[in-house]
Amino acid sequence: MFKRIFLIVDAGIEVRIVSMYATLISKSSKASFFLVPYTNNKGVLENIDFIKKMAKEEGIDAEILEIKDDILYGLNKIIRDKDLDLIITPLKRQENGLFFIGSFSQRLMKYALSSVMGIRIVKARPLKQHKKLLVPISDKDYNIKERLFLIEILSKSLNLSVSVLRCIKNPKGRFGKEEMQKTFLETKNYYSPFINQLKEKGIDTDLRIRECEHATDGILDETMASNYDLLFVKAKPQNTLKEFLIGNEVEDILRRTPSNLLFWRSRE
């Protein structure tokens, strides 16, 4: 699906873990792999050397793409009117203590012409140790081809079981037992086309429903309770295009996630 993968390379050990996901996606997509230095300091150069060596071991020729001045502007000039591309960027704690608000990653999510995946590393361990992937979905645009493609890459490459999560809220209060059973059946029927597509691809998939006041809390509670290794969240336009004065869903989930998190915004 992707023709080119652009990895933003910053300093820090977590960037090397991020590069493992980027390499996996590049290899599975048979996409060209470009390393974009965020700066030219020693830590970045060391990470580039590490990533190039790792990619070569996977049979991938990683090419360095140096962009002077504004990286986002430079990438958009390259991406414009081209085939589907993906920019991958680490989501790191900034000097102000925030992960997302005011960061370069947020600018990418807002303005990049391609799809973007930000990766937050909580557990620095080999990807092959992952066992379970959680995919929260909503009523809108849940059946995106790009999401199905990425889930298939991750699950098959890492032998992951996949759980699809729907958080629900009863405006009249908590659901009774019969209401919950009815809601589960309705939700199962509604999302069956999406889940069946995954199962048809040979992916072990189940549906989880959690009653919750706020979706962010429900996602994090489910991730913690069932000990998921990887969380795959689709960015909503309001979360990438707005900065709230009181709190921010993206910032909250990045700060509190107990597992590695893939935060993805589709170009579709």
Image: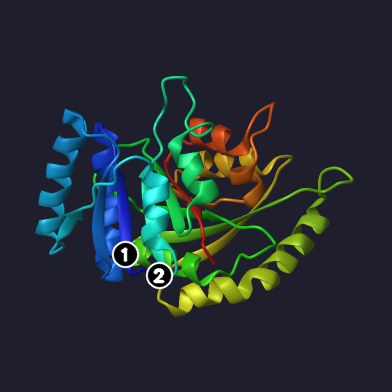
The three-letter amino acid code for the residue at tag 2 is Lys
Question: Which residue is labeled 2 in the image?
Answer: 82
- Quadrant of the drawing holding the N terminus: bottom left
Asked if residue 77 lies left or right of residue 6, the reply is right
- The crowd level at tag 2 (other Cα within 10 Å; few <14, some 14-19, many 20+) is few
Residue 229 visible, this angle: no
Residue closest to the eye, 82 or 6: 82
Q: Position of residue 226 (x, y in %)?
A: 49, 45
Q: Secondary structure at mark 2?
A: loop
Q: Which type of secondary structure does the marked residue at label 1 adopt?
A: strand
- The disc, 2 or 1, on the residue closer to the chain's N-terminal end is 1
Judge left or right: residue 176 versus residue 13.
right
Q: Are the residues at dot 2 and dot 1 in contact (C-beta closer than 8 Å)?
A: yes
Comparing 82 with 15, the one in front is 82
Q: Amino acid at mark 1?
A: Arg
As drawn, 267 above or below 122: below
Q: CA distance from mark 2 to mark 1?
A: 10 Å
At x 32% / y 55%, what residue is drawn? 6
Q: Position of residue 261 (x, y in %)?
A: 44, 44
**Residue 20 x %, y %:** 25, 50
Residue visible at 17% across and 57% down in the picture:
62
* Camera-side residue of 194 and 27: 27
* Residue indicated by mark 1: 4
Q: Is residue 173 visible?
A: yes
Examine the rendered structure and indicate whether residue 123 appears above or below residue 2: above
**What residue appears at the point 23 percent right and 41 percent down from the top-left corner?**
16
